[in-house]
Image (cartoon, rainbow, N blue to C red):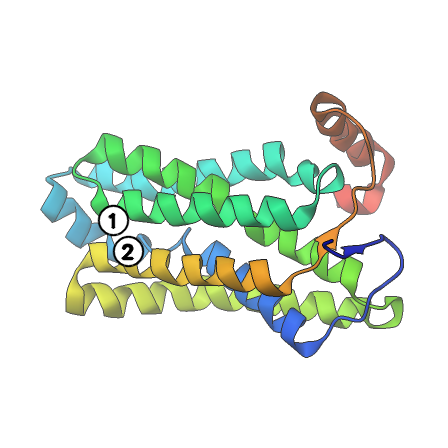
């Protein structure tokens, strides 16, 4: 039987688990920014106008925003480990689809899917908060956030270097392989998480509005 973490018990967050969460946050968010230094090359190969090429990052960010709004609350209702695994599978497929795209419509659809699934980073940060002892929670969550920020910073550099040597498609396909390998790591190392509510999906979405109204610090 899979062991599950009860919210509030603060299971010890080992160095290996902390690394898994930080690396995953970086990998998840990196996909949002791969395209930025490659837009010129992508525009030429796909025969896009400057305006059309400039929409590619927008599609990715729109997917990310939709994923945060529509998927983030699911971690309170279902086992966060399974949500992460599903998102990893989806992110792998979206990266492959981006690398195989032959036109703007295909690339736009794949970019939206990539953005939606990249929200796995938003599940890893609260996972760190659940697993960490209370006295170390801020430091451990900060480490995972550092992984996320490094993913943002390094993604542009890596994609620019790889695209310059092997082409822009290699960036997406190579990242798909890395993310798939990360999914195996999650499967083997991450414990299950107990649900903290039995609310339906609609009620979960509505609860975000209640939280927004109730907590001034969140609004700030």
Q: Earlier in the sequence, mark 1 or mark 2?
A: 1
Q: Nearer the viewer, residue 199 or 187?
A: 187
Q: Residue 199's spot in the image, x, y percent? A: 80, 27
* Residues tagged 1 and 2 counted as in contact (Cβ below 8 A): yes
Residue 46 in view in this figure: yes
State the SS at label 1.
helix
Residue in front for this viewpoint, 95 or 193:
193
Q: Which residue is mark 1?
A: 99
Could you tell whether 3 is left or right of 49 in the image? right
**Which numbered dot is residue 204?**
none
Instruction: Quadrant for residue 37, please give it.
Output: bottom left
Residue 104 image position (x, y, % from top left): 22, 34
Category of crowding for the residue at label 1, using alpha-carbon neighbours closer than 10 angstroms: few (below 14), some (14–19), many (at least 20):
many
Vertical comparison of 26 with 113: above or below? below
Q: Position of residue 116 (x, y in %)?
A: 49, 39
| Residue that numbered label 2 is attached to | 173
Q: Which residue appears farthest toward the front when viewing the image?
A: 1
In the image, taking residue 197 as reference, residue 178 lies left or right, namely: left
Residue in the image at 37% along x and 44% along y: 93
Where is residue 212 shown, x and y percent of the image?
Answer: 78, 35
Foreground of the two, 150 or 196: 196
Mark pair 1, 2: CA separation: 6 Å
């Amino acid at each position: 039987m899979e062991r599950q973490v009860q919210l509030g018990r603060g299971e010890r967050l080992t160095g290996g688990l902390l690394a898994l969460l930080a690396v995953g946050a970086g990998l998840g968010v990196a996909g949002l920014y791969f395209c930025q230094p490659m837009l010129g090359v992508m525009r030429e190969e796909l025969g896009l106008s400057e305006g059309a090429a400039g929409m590619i990052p927008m599609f990715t960010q729109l997917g990310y925003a939709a994923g945060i709004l529509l998927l983030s609350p699911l971690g309170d209702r279902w086992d966060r480990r399974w949500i992460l695994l599903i998102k990893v599978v989806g992110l792998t497929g979206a990266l492959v689809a981006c690398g195989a795209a032959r036109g703007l419509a295909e690339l736009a659809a794949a970019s939206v899917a990539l953005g939606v699934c990249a929200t796995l980073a938003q599940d890893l940060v609260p996972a760190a908060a659940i697993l960490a002892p209370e006295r170390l929670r801020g430091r451990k969550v900060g480490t995972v956030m550092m992984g996320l920020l490094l993913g943002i910073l390094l993604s542009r550099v890596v994609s620019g270097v790889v695209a310059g040597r092997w082409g822009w498609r290699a960036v997406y396909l190579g990242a798909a392989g890395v993310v798939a390998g990360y999914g195996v790591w999650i499967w083997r190392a991450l414990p299950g998480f107990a649900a903290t509510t039995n609310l339906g999906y609609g009620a979960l979405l509505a609860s975000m509005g209640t939280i927004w109204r109730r907590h001034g610090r969140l609004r700030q």
